[in-house]
Amino acid sequence: MTPARGGVRGGVLGGVRGGVSGMEDSGMDVRGRSPAGIVAEPVLRGPRLVLRPLTVAGIGALRDGRCGELESLTGTRITAGIQPPPLLDAALGPVRGRSLTESAAAGWWTWLAVERSTGTAVASPGLGGPPDADGCVTFGQATFAGHTGRGYAVESGCLLLDWAFREPRVRRALMTLPPHAAVALAVAARLGFAAIGRADDDEVGELVLLERTCRTT
């Protein structure tokens, strides 16, 4: 699980081109229906971004890097390469069908962060499923190439984590990052995460295990 090429990435082990004025306008068609790739609710709005959960179809397009399909499915603009949060492959492995569909619809999987002013998809934060029996969720995120260094990882991460912690069952969130990923670690700190130990990954090696136990202020 390595940092994404051209983007800030962190995770846990394991549309219409040229015609989009903004996600809040493009999120519904002329009949008031959501595009096939995004869930109508919940919607999270920040100063510059709006976040909506992806459906299973949208997750598949993001996972495989199919930019044109993701545009069509979500009604957003894609201006550069895309990549999913690093927890996605591990999470999708054992979970298919109905449980994935229900979790995605409820917001516990992968989200798309879009610039409100342009309708351009810039990042994808995500959760590794609903909270477990101990109230723990896993968190990861990816900022798309060409959109780094603008604070989108912090804004989108704060929006999603604050939403998750409004669920009474959620007591903590975990994520892992390579120890040399200074930028991603700085973003994690701004999101309220603190290092609590180390973890090992067969591909990456040693990772920093981080935990957040409360909402950021």
Image: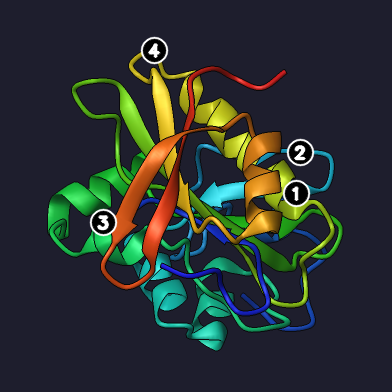
- Disc 2 to disc 4: CB gap under 8 Å: no
* Position of 194 relative to 48 (above/below): above
- Does label 2 or label 4 sit earlier along the sequence? 2
Q: Which residue is mark 4?
A: 168
Circle 3 residue:
14
Alpha carbon separation for disc pair 1 and 2: 5 Å
Residue at 32%, 73% (x, y): give it: 203
Image location of residue 11, percent across then percent down: 45, 53
From the image, state whether disc 1 or disc 3 is nearer to you.
Answer: 3
Disc 2 from disc 3: Cα separation = 30 Å
Residue 210's place in the image compared with 105, above or below, is above
**Which of the marked residues, 2 or 3, is nearer the chain's N terminus?**
3
Q: Earlier in the sequence, mark 1 or mark 3?
A: 3
Within-10-Å neighbours for mark 2: few <14, some 14–19, many 20+? some
Q: Is residue 140 above or below residue 213?
A: below
Q: Secondary structure at mark 2?
A: loop
The numbered mark at residue 46 is 2
* In the depicted structure, whether residue 132 falls above or below residue 205: above
Mark carried by residue 63? none
Badge 3: few (under 14), some or many (20 or more) residues near its Cα, within 10 Å? some
The image quadrant that residue 43 belongs to is: top right
Q: Position of residue 52 (x, y in %)?
A: 56, 49
Distance CA(mark 1)–CA(mark 4): 25 Å
